[in-house]
Image (cartoon, rainbow, N blue to C red):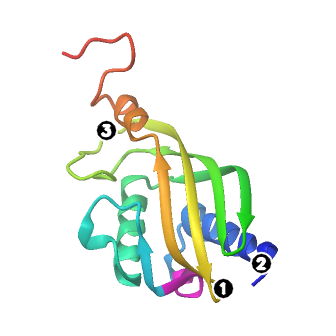
Amino acid sequence: MTILENKTIVRRWVDEVLNKHDLSVLGSLVMPDVVNHAVLVAELRYGFENFKRAIGALLVAFPDHHMEIEDMGAEEDKVWYRGTRSGTHLGPGPLPGIKPSGKYVAVQHIHILRLENGKIADHWAIRDDLGFLQQIGLFPAPGQRSS
């Protein structure tokens, strides 16, 4: 696959799965033995079904989830993007043990995806989890005192 083709696949991933919440297209975008290095629950790290469960849980936590890509780059078999993930936190998660807050959040993310044969084979992420916890009120923002 060319770099342009790989970037197109990642854009489909963001547009169709993360923004339109269409999990039915995952089979055409993700390898059966995908490794999700970014997931915090070890049991969900390996394989297509666990990848699908993790994404499904994210979309339950944020029914209006949206990822806005702000930068994208690629080299060889890897594509990265930086963006803002936003949505209203109405379901449990996405971090283990987090109850719904009802609050709208917008958090910066960087994702790196390795593609193989036109499908996502590995996923890494750098997320502002502290910013997320501050926005839902579980951790004090700078200058605030915890109660």
Choose the circle earlier in sequence order: 2 or 3.
2
The residue wearing badge 2 is 5
Whether residues under marks 1 and 3 lie with C-beta atoms below 8 angstroms apart, the answer is no
Q: Nearer the viewer, mark 1 or mark 3?
A: 1
Say which element carries label 1.
Answer: loop
The residue wearing badge 3 is 101
Quadrant of the drawing holding the C terminus = top left
Percent x, y of residue 136: 35, 33
66 above or below 23? Answer: above
The residue wearing badge 1 is 118
Choose the circle earlier in sequence order: 1 or 3.
3
Say which element carries label 2.
Answer: helix
Q: Amino acid at mark 2?
A: Glu
Q: Nearer the viewer, mark 2 or mark 3?
A: 2
68 above or below 106? Answer: below
Q: Amino acid at mark 1?
A: Gly
Dot 1, crowdedness within 10 Å: few (<14), some or many (≥20)?
A: some
Quadrant of the drawing holding the N terminus = bottom right
Task: Find the magenta span and give its range.
Answer: 25-31
Q: Main secondary structure of the magenta part?
A: helix
80 above or below 139? Answer: below
Whether residues under marks 2 and 3 lie with C-beta atoms below 8 angstroms apart, the answer is no
Percent x, y of residue 76: 72, 73
Whether residues under marks 2 and 1 lie with C-beta atoms below 8 angstroms apart, the answer is yes
Point 35% across, 63% down: residue:
57
Percent x, y of residue 62: 43, 52
Q: Amino acid at mark 3?
A: Ser
- Of the pair 93 and 38, the residue shown nearer to us: 38
Task: Based on the picture, tell me whether residue 29 belongs to the magenta stretch.
Answer: yes
